[in-house]
Image: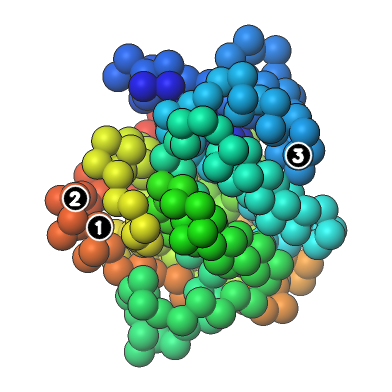
Amino acid sequence: MKVLISGINGFVGGVLRKSLEKKGHQVYGIDVKSRDPNVYPLDIADRSAVTGCLQEISPDFIYHLAAISHVDYGNPSILYNTNINGTINLLTASVNLKERPKFLFVSSCQVYGIVDDSMQPITEKTEVKPVNHYGASKAAAEHIARVFHAVYDLPMAIVRPFNHTGRGQSPDFIIPKIIQAIKNKKHEIELGNLAVTREFLDVRDVVAIYIKLMEQFPDGKIFNIAGGKGYKISDIIHLIQETTGISLRIKTTESLLRKNEITKLVGDGTALKETYNWQPAYSIKETLEWLLSE
């Protein structure tokens, strides 16, 4: 199968590419910079470039991963242009192909916003109510993708992955940041709110279900990618220190505290489990050990 991954050089895109190539698929990509002949160096916000790329490749399947994914990104205009207009460009180019590809839009658990503890773990039926620009951009792009599905019959599915980590993730994210500090033998690290609760899926589990969704495409469906287990940041720090035997002094920094902090994000993955018999294979301890052994 001919597969196109937008954001192929990102954390998840790189893992997905390797897994697809191992299965014998012909993989192409889009990213802002590349010297790889199979990766088109373009900005998804550039409509003509996206159109030309898709016409040249004519993919059978598209994984749309490309996005500005930082919750605290400082320029909302650029974020919305990339995450919304970039998605529109890919969708438009897809429906104009002679053979329309199947399109998996990778959204985010951030679309749910602040959800009361009594409503967690969060199901796909939970109200979409984002509280930051990243979540809002993903929610808007979801609605647009569903319209393309309804109006143009573009084969479409949407996933809302909860937090995931693994090798290759930027130290801008919490777990790689802590592990980098350990490896660099730092004695102190600056962090934000240690009491927030998040899932931390293993990227290998996430990629495994992405591939299964390609092989058994759930046209018109929306799925959480979640395991239902949440951990406080303080729990993660304790596990890392327990595994390594190294202690870090934690300094809470005001600039790392978010105004609209989502204190808990834990997802219900029942629908995915019932449909695909999928659940995370890796425990958080195994994921941390994998990261530490890199």
Find disc 1 in the rendering and name its residue.
272
Estimate the spatial distance between the alpha carbons at disc 2 and disc 3, rounded to whole Å. Answer: 35 Å
Q: Amino acid at mark 3?
A: Arg
Image quadrant holding the N terminus, namely: top left
Q: Earlier in the sequence, mark 1 or mark 3?
A: 3
Q: Amino acid at mark 1?
A: Leu
Q: Residue at x 36, y 41 (%)?
A: 210
Q: Residue at x 73, y 62 (%)?
A: 72
Which type of secondary structure does the marked residue at label 1 adopt?
helix
Where residue 10 sits: x, y (%)? Answer: 59, 34
Q: Residue at x 30, y 51 (%)?
A: 218
Find disc 3 in the rendering and name its residue.
47
Rendered view: 185 above or below 269:
above
Which is nearer the eye, 72 or 294? 72
Where residue 200 sits: x, y (%)? Answer: 41, 55
Which is nearer the eye, 252 or 167? 167
Labelled pair 2, 1 in contact (Cβ < 8 Å): yes
Frontmost of labels 1 and 3 is 3
Q: Amino acid at mark 2?
A: Tyr
Q: Earlier in the sequence, mark 2 or mark 3?
A: 3
- In which quarter of the view is residue 76 placed? bottom right
Where residue 77 sits: x, y (%)? Answer: 84, 59
